[in-house]
Amino acid sequence: MALTTQRFKFILIGIGTVLCIPLIAMQFTNEVNWSPFDFMVALVLLLSLGITIELILQKIKGVNSKLVWIVIALFCFFLIWAELDVGLFGTPFAGS
């Protein structure tokens, strides 16, 4: 099963909207300072999350199972994001 065109457009629009938040914030404050690399990493993470959730919705049977797997995917996403943002665990992955 491939990604449906309509859902993939929705995923891309959502990612674009989320990435506009720091882009707009950078215009008004010096506290938000993202480089192009930061935007690329965020794009890859968000796209991976969107595709993962789409695959979960397509492949997993049962509402409860889908919910559990989506929560696991979100938890992993937020752990990676927190590690990259503040070095939550102090791994070399975050540059610590």
Image (tube, helix red, strand yellow):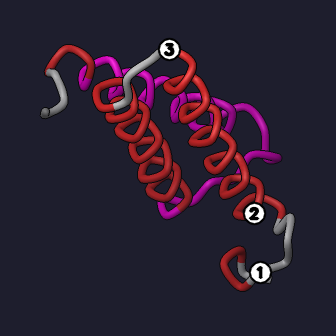
Magenta stretch prevailing secondary structure: helix
**The residue stretch that appears in magenta:** 8-37
Q: Residues within 10 Å of mark 3 (few under 14, many from 20)?
A: few
Q: Nearer the viewer, mark 1 or mark 3?
A: 3
- Mark 2: which amino acid? Glu
- In terms of secondary structure, where does tag 1 sit? loop
| In-front residue for pair 41/24 | 41
Q: Which residue is mark 3?
A: 63
Relative side of 84 to 61, left or right: right
Q: Residue at x 86, y 64 (%)?
A: 88
Q: Spatial distance from mark 1 to mark 2, Cα to Cα?
A: 8 Å
Q: Is residue 3 part of the magenta span, yes or no? A: no
Tell which circle, 1 or 2, labels the residue nearer the N-terminal end.
2
Foreground: 22 or 1?
A: 1
Under mark 3, the amino acid is Val
Residue under pointer 1: 91
Q: Is residue 80 left or right of residue 83?
A: left
Q: Which of the two labelled residues, at mark 1 and mark 3, occupies the earlier sequence position?
A: 3
CB contact under 8 Å: marks 1 and 2 = yes
- Residue 96 on image: x %, y %: 80, 83
Task: Give the quadrant of the N terminus.
Answer: top left
Badge 2, how many Cα within 10 Å: few under 14, some, many 20+? some
Q: What element does badge 3 sit on?
A: helix
Q: Amino acid under label 1?
A: Thr
The residue lying toward the viewer, choosing from 34 and 72, is 72
Tell me the residue that label 2 is attached to. Answer: 83
